[in-house]
Image (tube, rainbow, N blue to C red):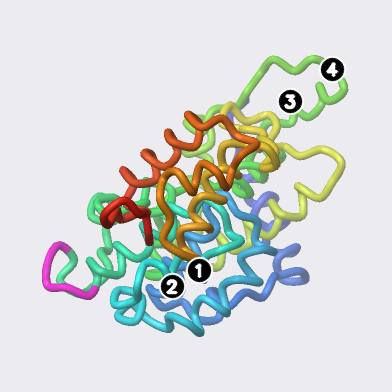
Amino acid sequence: MKAVTAKQIQKFKDTIWTYYTANKRPMPWRENTSTYYVVVSEIMLQQTQVSRVMQKFPHFIDRFPDWLSLARAETKNVLQEWSGLGYNRRALFLKRIAEEITKQGTTKGVLPKTVNKLEKLPGIGPNTAGSILAFAYNSPHPFIETNIRSVFIHFFFTEIEKTLGKQACKKVHDDELIPLIEKTLDMHNPREWYYALMDYGSYLKKQLTNPSRHSAHHVKQTPFKGSNRELRAGILKKIIEKPMTEKTIIRSFHSCKPDDVRKNIKALSAEGFKIKKGIRYLV
């Protein structure tokens, strides 16, 4: 990619802000930027579409309106409210974060304000930490997520777009995008700037050509039906409903190989989903 000029950067910013002014998407966590709303939404949005989170978020907040209510909730109830969002381990991470936030310990009752400290919390990596800093504290920290990635590839790596319909070998690495994100970052209002980038990225993805396909980090989601994820979710759902023995769980999934069911029971237990009492598993 050629060096980006000041004129190109200004044109880029004008395009993003103009689109956002006319098409900004209302979301509960944008209206209320408390640390609790922001963290819950960011954990939910990991690997889940905004439209689905928009449906589940209000019900989750009604059930667990703050850090303390979530920290004190039974794991079973949290998982029940999480149902439908997928990747259930994120619900455990969120509850553990709440437990950390509400005790006198690592965070001293307050959500950390640095990437290093945020990354010590369960389920929070560098990009989620950066998004939390931007949205909860309006702190100008560079981070990447899928929509932001699409925007920068679309605007600054046009040579890839021109190869559409051909065999495109070039893949853009996030390391190439970070300098551009830093250079264009609005230092006075990073929160709103990131909202604008994400909304424009969402718009791009609805077009015929999704720029994210040219990212070195792009992973096509595998079908849920018939996958190991479906089996894991099914096992978890059954033991949330009632305690079950391993033998009963295996019988419930007669179309699956018993060894596959056993491996998933073991994996879920290791991740903290299940408690074994006697010969039964329960949440």
Check disc 3 and report its element: helix, strand or loop: helix
Question: Which residue is at a point 43% across and 33% down the rendered structure image?
Answer: 263
Earlier along the polypeptide chain: callout 2 or callout 4? 2
Residue denoted by label 2: 77
Answer with the quarter of the image where residue 26 lies: bottom right
User: Which quadrant is the N terminus positioned in?
Assistant: top right
Mark identifier at residue 80: 1
Residue span colored magenta = 102-106
Q: Residues within 10 Å of mark 4 (few under 14, many from 20)?
A: few
Q: CA distance from mark 1 to mark 4?
A: 46 Å
Can you say whether 13 is above or below 246 in the image? below
Amino acid type of the residue tagged 2 in the rendering? Asn
Check disc 2 and report its element: helix, strand or loop: helix
Q: Residues within 10 Å of mark 2 (few under 14, many from 20)?
A: some
Classify residue 157 as left or right of residue 174.
right
Residue 187 place in picture, x, y as percent: 44, 61
Amino acid type of the residue tagged 1 in the rendering? Gln
Earlier along the polypeptide chain: callout 3 or callout 2? 2
Classify residue 16 as left or right of residue 47.
right
Residue denoted by label 3: 160
Report the mark closest to the observer, 2 or 4. 2
Residue denoted by label 4: 166
Asked whether disc 3 touches disc 2, contact meaning CB atoms under 8 Å apart, the reply is: no
Asked whether disc 1 touches disc 4, contact meaning CB atoms under 8 Å apart, the reply is: no
Earlier along the polypeptide chain: callout 3 or callout 4? 3
Residue 29 place in picture, x, y as percent: 53, 74
Question: Which residue is at a point 72% across and 71% down the rendered structure image?
Answer: 21
Classify residue 56 as left or right of residue 44.
right
Q: CA distance from mark 3 to mark 2?
A: 47 Å
Asked whether disc 1 touches disc 2, contact meaning CB atoms under 8 Å apart, the reply is: yes
Check disc 1 and report its element: helix, strand or loop: helix
Report the mark closest to the observer, 1 or 4. 1
